[in-house]
Image: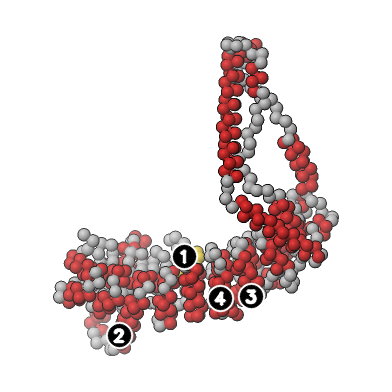
Amino acid sequence: MAYIGNTERLCHAIVECDIEGVKACLTEEKINPNDRDHTGRTPLQLACLTSTSDIVQCLVDHGARMISRLADGRTALHLAAARGDLEMVRVLLHKSKQNETEQARLEKQPDEGSDECQQEPDTSESESVNSESFVHVRKESDKMDGMDLAMAENEQEPDIYDINVVAWDVPTSALHLAILHGHIEVAQELVTSFGADLALPVKLLYPYQPRARAAILCLVLALRLPIEKSIAMTQKLLQLGALPTQADMSSVTPLHYAVACDFTDSSEILQTYFHQNRSATVKAMNFLSSFSNPWNVKPHSTLTLALTVRNDKAANKLIEAGATPQIDFKSFVNPGQAIYGAIKTNSSDRNKAIFRHDFTQPIILAVQKDLPVIADRLLRSDGVDPNTLTPDGYRVLDSEYMRNYTVGKTLLDCVRDKIRSLGNYHGEKLGVSPPCQLVKPDHCLNGLQPDTYHRWTVERAVRQAKAQYAKDQERYNLAVYANDRREGVKEKTLEVRATLDAYKALEKVLVEKGAKSFYDIYPDFENPWKKRKTGDKSDSDSKHQEPEPFKVETKFCVPDLTDEKKQRYFDL
């Protein structure tokens, strides 16, 4: 049985949406509407999960407590909001308002029996615990699980909802659940009619600590929906007053999450932001967020983040909207930026080093992430330096030690590296190397006496080598066959050629604008890879040498092996 006592009929009537049966159970049989089943659900919670708003209305009219919680801390309001039943949400919250009005009226009345109440002694410690408020019961929760906490509810507590109350296991409010499940009308009703807080994030706590480790904003929750629902929910939240400039504990705004989300085309989400609140969105667009800590600052604007995840459509949308194409040091250390809190105690030299060594300019990212068209668009923007250096280039400039093994690069060097790499593409590489050819393996048997241990050992080694070579050759042939039949190679080759042409066009524009390679700009520095490349050539030449004839080395694990004893082993 899943039910306690005589609540079985009531629960069946709730599940079957039989309102007459529910009324009969509550009026004729006098069933307590707050008795729980073995899963810890009250009839009202069951109704919010499976039944109708009329039955919910009937239950609350007959005294069902609304603020009772499940084992995970969700209330009936959480269940109704997650289900998306607008009328059910209204029933619960209107009843809560009625209870609040009644409670305020009772508190204004003179307390006629106050003397008797004050003279009543405390009967026992257990009675005192039972009369404690629900919040105080949770102070002893270290020895209680969720079900115990739910069952330990103080029924004398006013049955009034805090609209922003959160569950226990996953600290979400009714508004958070409505957003996550894509119920736009419910979210609108919670905010406009009942005052749900749009600025309240989902606070994720450290285990066994009342301290938040992360926060998820309402606009970020909307990004987890399918693209159509996400756009609609984002539009509604922005209309209701959600701000694109609100940042989480890591100083990351919803706009940063929008450009980094895994939608096929997130430019529509960005268009929604710009359409609903352009001024705040533009401010958030150029907001530098720090994704790490003061000793390892990783700053990102929305544009650099879009380029990092290769979201070219979002990047184009941001450039059209006026995203800053090149960040200067003054903007980097601006007190209005999110990273200012992480760098404000540093010296100016330290902050300059962070800016030069840990921040990659948008145009460099565009080249590195195979987005030459966007790089060309950025290059034609005002304020973009055609001789922009990579972080490694700045490290070579600033550190003599780094010059010994780090190659400094400019934007032109990055473009030429891509041209060289794409120009060397001639189809997909095999994951298997061809087996090393056996050269005259049978010659190992020359001069060996038949019917001796030595000849038998060499013959076995030759057989094993031939068998292994046959296996390796078969595996290699299969790999070649699979590679020849690989799908998409033609399309990839065409895409590589198109990208190569785009990089060549970008190189031409760079040269016209006076771009140079790093070691042309700084001729006093020497490329540390020149000597290594010379060594690599000699190594590559050695690879083309003819393979040596097959040899068999016979060894004996004997501690006192001499040449005479070794020969006697061979002669066995």
- Quarter of the picture containing the C terminus is top right
Q: Which of the marked residues, 2 or 1, is nearer the chain's N terminus?
A: 2
Q: Residue at x 64, y 65 (%)?
A: 304
Which percent across, then down, holds residue 144?
Answer: 33, 61
Q: Which residue position is annotated with label 2?
A: 102
Element under label 4?
helix
Near mark 2 (Cα within 10 A), the count class, few <14, some 14-19 or many ≥20, is few
Q: Which residue position is annotated with label 3?
A: 321
Residue nearest the observer in this picture, 189 or 266: 266
Q: Which of the marked residues, 1 or 3, is nearer the chain's N terminus?
A: 1
Cα separation, mark 2 vs mark 1, equals 35 Å
Name the side, left or right, on which 219 lies relative to 166.
right
Q: Residue 179 falls in which quadrant of the image?
A: bottom left
Q: Which of the marked residues, 4 or 2, is nearer the chain's N terminus?
A: 2
Q: Nearer the viewer, mark 2 or mark 3?
A: 3
The relative height of residue 435 versus residue 261 in the rendered view (above or below) is above
Is residue 441 visible in the rendered image? The answer is yes
Q: Residue at x 58, y 77 (%)?
A: 274
Q: Which mark is residue 204?
A: 1
Element under label 3?
loop
